[in-house]
Image (cartoon, rainbow, N blue to C red):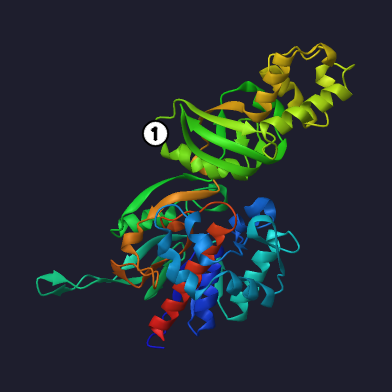
Amino acid sequence: MSSLLPVVVIGAGAAGLMAAGRAAQLGAKVILLEKNKAVGRKLLISGKGRCNVTNNGDIEIFMPNYHGEGRFLYSAFHHFFHDDLINLLNQFGVETKVERGGRVFPVSDKAADVVQGLLKYVRKHGVELRTEEEVLEICLEQDEAKGKGQVKRQIKGVKTTRGLLESQAVIVATGGKSYPATGSTGDGFKWAAALGHTVITPRPALVPLNIKEDWVKQLQGLALKNIEVTLTQGKKVLGKEFGEMLFTHFGVSGPVILTLSGLVVEKEARQGLQLHFNLKPALDEETLDKRLQRDLQKYQRKQLQNALDELLPQRLIPVVISASDIPPDKFVHQITKEERNSLLQILRDLRMTVLGPRSLAEAIVTAGGVSLREVNPGTMESKLIQGLYFAGEVLDIDGLTGGYNLQAAFSTGYLAGEKTALRLL
């Protein structure tokens, strides 16, 4: 190597572990710094503890699943994509499986196994892992005058709680600002801005939504599958998704809600935002009406509140009946055609008023971050400072649910680790 100084990787999450492992694999001396006691804390809670590591779709399927400049990831994906990730995890004892929508999970359904696999990767190649060591500042060499201008600034190292650590290559993989309890407190944004980088204002992405109606609290914990949700503002349809959702004590969450949440975050004026739930999207109106008539005929001697068990989850029945303005204790054989039609319309269009998104701290992913215009997509190196690299969620790129965000983190981390090592060899 041209230098005995180490590559310093800041942050031992998905991007940082991958960057450190790849740089060390190519022969670089690598020091991986993590301010927490343990590594991969956000990975451990991803996918509800199951860790949706990637998606098995091809690159052209991936691209539309990122907001903004998704094409920035082309180089990183060509260097290291889902098959490469799956093979690497398999090498270190993590078998994977493919589920609905191409989502890839560990066979064990344990995110901890993914973290352990990545730890085996970095340890095999001799990465020096330092936990509970916090970076205070990224330091630069003194600028040198050159003609009428100046040479490109150069990394000198990082100042940590244990002193100055000299390096000619530093990879910032500190994540965003979502789930700050895991250590993602926006440190990378602060350092990047201090070094002259543009930081696009961080904001929540893939975030639950607050709902106005009080009845949602009664449904806390209830999950619905195979439903269609439409987001509107006035008469304008903003988006539509099919899949799963979850009721919470404040509103709604789950895959379809998280996907639509980006459209809510983008709206500065949130008046008139509504969610429309089609509880039976597989049935057209005529077919659903026949199904409803059949159930009502079957239970004609019962009260309505006891006649919809085959059609809806038990906890949802009172809400649907209330929205249809039919007395819940009315006997089925007394229900009029108009009342049945009202019930039918609610099944196809149960409405909720959106107040807005939850906070950035509750978002799965941070939108915003270091401007992609100031980072070389082929190396992940800063265009402003020589030897400074970025990887993962610290960059201004975010994707939808389905494994897209973690693959972006793994791919950019791998590319940054490879290029730093080759630069110093």
Q: Nearer the viewer, residue 275 or 336?
A: 336
Residue 229 placement (x, y as % from top left): 59, 37
Residue in the image at 57% along x and 39% along y = 208
- The image shows residue 62, relative to residue 3, as above or below, that is above
- Locate the C terminus by quadrant: bottom left
**Residue found farthest to the bottom:** 1
Residue in the image at 71% along x and 35% along y = 221
Q: Which residue is mark 1?
A: 268
Residue 134 placement (x, y as % from top left): 48, 60
- The image shows residue 228, relative to residue 329, as above or below, that is below
Q: Nearer the viewer, residue 97 or 214?
A: 97
Residue 179 placement (x, y as % from top left): 55, 47
Residue in the image at 61% along x and 35% along y = 252
Question: What SS does tag 1 mark?
Answer: loop
- Locate the N terminus by quadrant: bottom left
**Residue found farthest to the left:** 148
Asked if residue 202 shows in the view, the reply is: yes
Q: Is the residue marked by circle 1 packed among few (<14), some (14-19), or many (20+) residues within 10 Å?
A: few
Asked if residue 174 shows in the view, the reply is: no
Taking the image as shown, residue 14 lies to the left or right of residue 219, namely left
Residue 122: quadrant of the picture: bottom right
Taking the image as shown, residue 347 lies to the left or right of residue 211, namely right
Residue 322: quadrant of the picture: top right
Residue in the image at 58% along x and 43% along y = 241
Q: Amino acid at mark 1?
A: Glu
